[in-house]
Amino acid sequence: MTDHTARLDHVVLWVRDPLAAADFYQKAVGMEPVRLTEFAAGEVPFPSVRVNDETILDLMPLTFAERMTMLPGAADSSGHPVNHVCLSLPRGDFDTLLSRLREHSVPVSELSYGSFGARGEAERSFYFRDPDGNVFEARHYD
């Protein structure tokens, strides 16, 4: 039987240096790199990092913006980031991420309580930026 549930497959982030971005997401956020070796060898156009078994973040070189021709005006998306991407984590992983970011001297916002999201009100959440200025929210519901 095929599962026809809609899922988020990937989010593409514009980054200045994909290797540095992958290093940040691996070390400070704890995400597993995908195709990093192949990217470094020039075999693929960009690396990714794994959010979970079903979702990745593609780390697209900013220099590729001019190649975005699949939709009129797509190249203009470079430099116009999404407001933020939210990661929903179990409580323990939330605490681990917060500690890991602080250990790597990544500035984080104050904790928020009861903010609304896809699963209702989150118990706690906070925001942080990656080295390219992309904003992330981390939250947990349990």
Image (tube, helix red, strand yellow):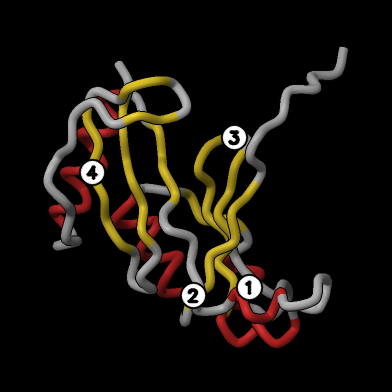
Asked if the residues shown at circle 1 and circle 2 are in contact, with their CB atoms under 8 angstroms apart, the answer is no
| Camera-side mark, 4 or 2 | 4
Q: Position of residue 91 (x, y in %)?
A: 27, 24
Q: Which of pointers 3 and 1 lies earlier in the amino acid sequence?
A: 1
Q: Which residue is mark 4?
A: 126
Q: Quadrant of the C terminus?
A: top left
Q: Which of pointers 2 and 3 lies earlier in the amino acid sequence?
A: 2
Q: Position of residue 36 (x, y in %)?
A: 57, 65
| Camera-side mark, 3 or 4 | 4
Asked if residue 5 is positioned above or below residue 107 in the image, the reply reads above
State the separation of the CA atoms marked 2 and 3.
23 Å
Q: Which residue is mark 3?
A: 53
State the separation of the CA atoms marked 1 and 4.
31 Å
The residue type indicated by label 2 comes to Val
State the separation of the CA atoms marked 4 and 2.
22 Å
| Camera-side mark, 3 or 1 | 3
How many neighbours does mark 1 have within 10 angstroms: few (below 14), some (14-19), or many (20 or more)? some
Foreground residue among 88 and 19: 88
Apparent side of residue 50 relative to residue 101 in the rendered image (left or right): right
Q: Which of pointers 1 and 2 lies earlier in the amino acid sequence?
A: 2
Foreground residue among 29 and 79: 79
The residue type indicated by label 3 comes to Asp
| Camera-side mark, 1 or 2 | 2
* The label number, if any, that marks residue 15 in the structure image: 2
Q: Position of residue 14 (x, y in %)?
A: 53, 72
Q: Position of residue 92 (x, y in %)?
A: 25, 26
Q: Which of pointers 4 and 2 lies earlier in the amino acid sequence?
A: 2
* The label number, if any, that marks residue 39 in the structure image: 1
Asked if residue 49 is positioned above or below residue 23 in the image, the reply reads above
Q: Which of pointers 1 and 4 lies earlier in the amino acid sequence?
A: 1
Q: Residue at x 48, y 68 (%)?
A: 81
Asked if residue 88 is positioned above or below residue 57 in the image, the reply reads above
